[in-house]
Image: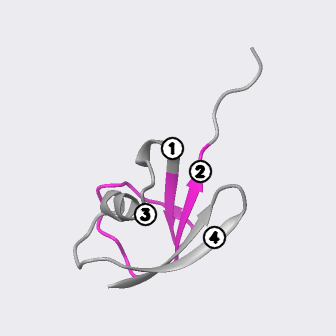
């Protein structure tokens, strides 16, 4: 299955990715070499669990930044 992915981290990068049918979002992140602990995945603007199957909709991957002043 071919999906369009937008990665939002230090700018925006878009790419089209081929993933096997039945793949999870966690497997998609692995194929992109993205640590699943530092991102939130959105499908059509809605956050999705990483163990959910990839849908052929628009996928946005947002890097989460934590920390701050002490």
Residue 30 sits in which quadrant? bottom left
Q: Nearer the viewer, mark 3 or mark 2?
A: 3
The residue that appears at 25% across and 78% down in the rendered structure is 20
Provide the residue designation for mark 4: 13
Kindly report the distance in space between the C-alpha atoms of the residues bearing marks 1 and 2.
6 Å
Q: Residue at x 71, y 55 (%)?
A: 10
Q: Are marks 3 and 2 in contact (CB under 8 Å)?
A: no
Q: Is 1 positioned to the left or the right of 29 in the image?
A: left
Give the labeled residue for mark 3.
Answer: 32
Q: Where's residue 58, x and y in %?
A: 52, 78
Q: Residue at x 22, y 73 (%)?
A: 22
Q: Which residue is mark 1?
A: 38
Q: Which stretch appears magenta?
A: 40-64
Residue at image location 72% in from the left, 62% down from the top: 11
Q: Which label sits in the foreground, 4 or 1?
A: 4
Mark 3 or mark 2, which has the lower sequence index? Answer: 3
């Amino acid at each position: 299955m071919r999906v369009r992915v937008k990665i939002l981290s230090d700018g925006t990068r878009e790419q089209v990715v081929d993933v096997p049918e039945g793949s999870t979002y966690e497997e998609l992140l692995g194929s992109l070499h993205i640590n699943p602990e530092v991102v939130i995945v959105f499908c059509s603007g809605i956050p999705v669990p990483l163990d959910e199957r990839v849908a052929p909709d628009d996928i946005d991957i947002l890097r989460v930044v934590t920390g701050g002043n002490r």
